[in-house]
């Protein structure tokens, strides 16, 4: 059994390939979006916001799982800790990439137009909250809070590489406990600001939870894919065991079930209430192509992953589990489009409209995803893939060696 040692950071060659691929995809996608913006600026802003919501969600989801790990412990979190830390440190990049969203406020948000607010009693009552200066200020606060949490979680974790320190471990647990409260509030308010206010006449008290669960599910799926890929090379190849992969698979299953639960809860509450200001949101998503997309999500985002992840053998195979996780990750993008697409197109509560997917709806996730992957890979290369000072690393390596 090998043990962590000080020295040069050992990094799989795959990380550099991810960095190059991300740079290429980000550059090509950004060029395509720039051309698209010149042709149809309104569509550019709609597609860009959709993509930004997805990739920012993964960065924030890294924070959520990281803090859950610091509070609960477990070898599963130790295996993916540096992946999560690197992902969370991309938040400043996503903050910079939020600037085009701010530029597109007049296009995206009807409440930003004074003449519309003046003729709409509902928007007048919400004007104290839904106004441009306050919207921008809240966005700055969200990104500052997330970046601050990411900074200290990474800083203190790296400090532990010099050796076990109970004071640092307590700081990490303390920050995680309070940080999860901050995260819950900021995710809720940011989802209301950036997504729900696209349709300011509709509201749901579960909407923020939909985003929280979706972000955690997306992040866990991505982490599993990365573990399967990076686990082929040192140093993760010495740490990946069937038992730890099994734990990751059980968490993925739990988050898939939780996603279904909160979505069903929102639907049942709105259906039973049968209020005219709430039900049109679902009517727009239950007709035409949106209805077919709903069926796709029920079958392939919930039912099929649920059945597959019930298999113990599948959850103990990194390669097989990664295939399911990759499918879930793709469906997460589809689910987000179902969630905000009709509102971005301006008819989220106006009855039946056909499903339409613009080419920029595909180019934007590629562009921002490439930039995110490039930033993520650079952050991942800056520290050892396994925490060096955590005493549980020896247990993690021993478990892997016992199953080899």
Image: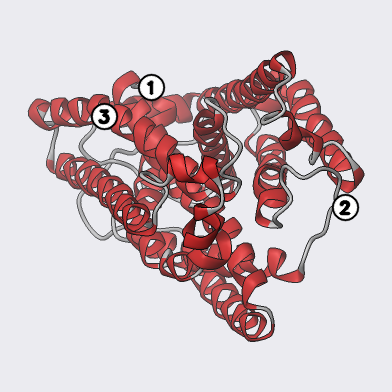
Q: Residue 10, image x and y in percent?
A: 35, 57
**Front residue of 155 and 352:** 352
Q: Give above or below for 177 relative to 105.
A: above
List the residue tagged with mark 2.
354
Q: CA distance from mark 2 to mark 3?
A: 44 Å
Q: Earlier in the sequence, mark 2 or mark 3?
A: 3
Name the residue that disc number 3 marks.
Answer: 176
Residue 91 position, x and y percent, is 36, 55
The local secondary structure at tag 1 comes to: loop
Residue 161 located left or right of residue 200: left
Q: Secondary structure at mark 2?
A: loop
x, y (%) of residue 41?
62, 77
Q: Taking the image as drawn, is residue 247 in sight?
A: yes
Q: Nearer the viewer, residue 274 or 2?
A: 274
Quarter of image, res 389: top left
Q: Please name the residue shown 54% across and 28% down the image.
A: 248
Quarter occupied by residue 315: top right
Quickly name the residue at label 1: 74
Nearer-the-camera pick, 54 or 352? 352
Question: Could you tell me which secondary element the residue under label 3 belongs to?
Answer: helix
* Left or right of 306 in this view: 157: left
* Marks 1 and 2 in Cβ contact (< 8 Å): no
On screen, residue 176 versus residue 242, left or right, reads: left
> Marks 1/3: CA distance?
15 Å
Whichever of labels 1 and 3 marks the residue nearer the N terminus, that label is 1
Eye-nearest disc, 2 or 3: 2
Image marks 2 and 3: residues in contact by CB distance under 8 Å: no
Crowd band around label 2 with a 10 angstrom C-alpha radius: few (<14), some (14–19), many (20+): few
Residue name at image x 46 percent, y 46 percent: 193
On-image quarter of the N terminus: top left
Residue displayed at 43% across by 49% down:
59
Rendered position, 71 above or below 357: above
């Amino acid at each position: 059994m090998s043990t962590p040692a000080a020295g040069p950071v050992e990094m799989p060659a795959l990380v550099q390939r991810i960095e190059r691929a991300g740079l290429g995809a980000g550059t090509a996608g950004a060029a395509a979006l720039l051309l698209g913006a010149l042709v149809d600026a309104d569509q550019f802003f709609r597609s860009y916001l959709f993509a930004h919501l997805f990739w920012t969600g993964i960065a924030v989801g890294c924070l959520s799982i990281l803090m859950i790990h610091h509070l609960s412990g477990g070898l599963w979190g130790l295996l993916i800790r540096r992946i999560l830390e690197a992902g969370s440190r991309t938040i400043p990049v996503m903050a910079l990439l939020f600037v085009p969203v701010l530029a597109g406020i007049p296009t995206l948000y009807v409440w930003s137009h004074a003449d519309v607010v003046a003729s709409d009693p509902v928007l007048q009552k919400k004007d104290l909250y839904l106004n441009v200066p306050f919207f921008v200020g809240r966005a700055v606060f969200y990104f500052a809070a997330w970046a601050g949490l990411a900074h200290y979680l990474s800083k203190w974790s790296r400090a532990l590489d010099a050796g076990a320190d109970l004071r640092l471990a307590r700081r990490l647990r303390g920050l995680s406990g309070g940080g999860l409260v901050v995260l819950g509030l900021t995710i809720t308010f940011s989802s209301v600001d950036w997504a729900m206010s696209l349709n300011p006449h509709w509201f749901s008290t579960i909407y923020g939870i939909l985003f929280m669960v979706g972000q955690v599910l997306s992040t866990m799926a991505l982490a599993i894919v990365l573990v399967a890929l990076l686990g082929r090379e040192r140093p993760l190849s010495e740490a990946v065991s069937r038992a730890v992969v099994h734990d990751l698979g059980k968490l993925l299953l739990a988050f898939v079930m939780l996603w279904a639960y909160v979505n069903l809860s929102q639907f049942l509450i709105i259906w039973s209430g049968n209020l005219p200001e709430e039900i049109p949101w679902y009517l727009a998503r239950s007709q035409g192509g949106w209805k077919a997309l709903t069926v796709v999500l029920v079958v392939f985002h919930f039912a099929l992953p649920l059945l597959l992840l019930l298999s113990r053998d599948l959850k103990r195979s990194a390669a097989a589990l990664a295939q399911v996780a990759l499918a879930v990750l793709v469906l997460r993008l589809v689910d987000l489009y179902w969630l905000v697409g009709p509102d971005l197109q301006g008819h989220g509560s106006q009855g039946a409209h056909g499903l339409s997917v613009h080419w920029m709806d595909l180019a934007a996730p590629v562009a921002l995803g490439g930039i995110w992957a490039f930033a993520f890979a650079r952050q991942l290369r800056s520290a050892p893939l396994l925490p060096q000072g955590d005493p549980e690393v020896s247990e993690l390596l021993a478990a892997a060696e016992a199953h080899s």
